[in-house]
């Protein structure tokens, strides 16, 4: 009866999206204008789709797997992104959402890896990125997805930044910390030869809850609304 378990979050989302105010307003408008505002339904659906597609997705999943294994995750926090690290002396600055590429020779043939930037940390020199069927293939549309690897330069299409990954980091395999100017920084991911793999297997686990929302600007005195998800 897996479908019963999934109804619970759906009810909570519907209750939050269609509240008493929405029901009251729509009832009054329907009674007054009948079918005269039916066109607004089409417009509102299209606008809602646009808002949802551009929103940040927050979700809950159960039983996700460790990357590259069939083992269930037990860590409290994990990262689903890929990352590359540069030398502490690197002066360039990549920008979020730009396309990055890296060309290297494999078996005598030039191979280009392509991805989109998620974030850039100018202090730790960690660049997080993702690759999918759209932003991870080269050439675009008709190409293939290749992994970033080695010390060849990673170039930013928008920022113009170009740097060679620090393949000598870390000195100890699977390290997740870096010391810069006597200060140790937690990188949040385990690196090997300058790169970090995702810690969670893509598309693993069962989706329990998904919530689409805009980015949140937080203030020091902000009051948080907490949603409780009940699993049946």
Image: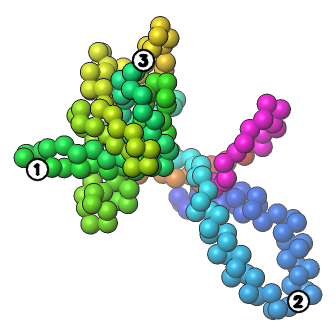
Disc 1 from disc 2: Cα separation: 67 Å
Task: Tell me the SS state at disc 3.
Answer: strand
> Closer to us: mark 1 or mark 2?
1
Disc 2 from disc 3: Cα separation: 65 Å
Q: Which mark is residue 178?
A: 3
Side (left or right) of 210 relative to 135: right
Disc 1 from disc 3: Cα separation: 35 Å
User: Of residues 124 and 173, which is closer to you in this image?
Assistant: 124
Vertical placement of residue 93 versus 13, above or below: above
Farthest left residue in view: 108
Circle 1 residue: 109
**Mark 3 neighbour class, 10 Å CA radius: few under 14, some 14 to 19, many 20 or more:** some
Vertical placement of residue 223 versus 22, above or below: above
Q: Is residue 78 visible?
A: yes
Q: Is residue 228 visible?
A: no
Is residue 217 located in the magenta-colored stretch of the structure? yes
The residue at 45%/39% (across/down) is 94
Q: Are marks 2 and 3 in contact (CB under 8 Å)?
A: no
Q: Position of residue 4 (x, y in %)?
A: 60, 60
User: Of residues 120 and 82, which is closer to you in this image?
Assistant: 120
The residue at 79%/30% (across/down) is 220
Q: Position of residue 158 (x, y in %)?
A: 44, 49
Of callouts 1 and 3, the N-terminal one:
1
**Magenta region: which residues?**
211-225
Side (left or right) of 47 relative to 167: right
Vertical placement of residue 16 versus 104, above or below: below
Q: Position of residue 97 (x, y in %)?
A: 48, 49
User: Of residues 107 and 70, which is closer to you in this image?
Assistant: 107
Q: Position of residue 142 (x, y in %)?
A: 26, 66
């Amino acid at each position: 009866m897996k479908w019963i378990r999934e109804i619970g979050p759906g009810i909570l989302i519907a209750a939050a999206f269609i509240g008493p105010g929405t029901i009251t307003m729509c009832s009054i408008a329907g009674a007054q204008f009948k079918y005269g505002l039916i066109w607004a339904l089409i417009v509102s659906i299209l606008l809602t789709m646009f808002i949802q597609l551009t929103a940040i997705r927050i979700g809950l999943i159960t039983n996700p797997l460790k990357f590259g294994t069939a083992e269930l995750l037990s860590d409290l926090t994990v990262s689903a992104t890929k990352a590359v690290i540069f030398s502490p002396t690197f002066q360039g600055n990549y920008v979020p959402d730009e396309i990055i590429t890296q060309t290297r020779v494999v078996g005598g043939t030039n191979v280009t890896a392509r991805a989109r930037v998620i974030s850039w940390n100018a202090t730790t020199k960690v660049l997080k990125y993702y690759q999918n069927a759209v932003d991870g293939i080269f050439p675009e549309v008709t190409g293939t997805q290749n992994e970033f690897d080695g010390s060849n330069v990673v170039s930013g299409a928008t920022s113009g930044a170009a740097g060679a990954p620090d393949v000598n980091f870390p000195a100890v395999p699977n390290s997740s910390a870096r010391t810069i100017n006597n200060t140790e920084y937690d990188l949040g991911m385990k690196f090997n030869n300058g790169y970090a793999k995702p810690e969670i297997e893509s598309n693993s686990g069962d989706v329990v809850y998904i919530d689409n929302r805009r980015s949140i600007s937080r203030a020091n005195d902000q009051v948080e609304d907490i949603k409780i998800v009940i699993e049946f």
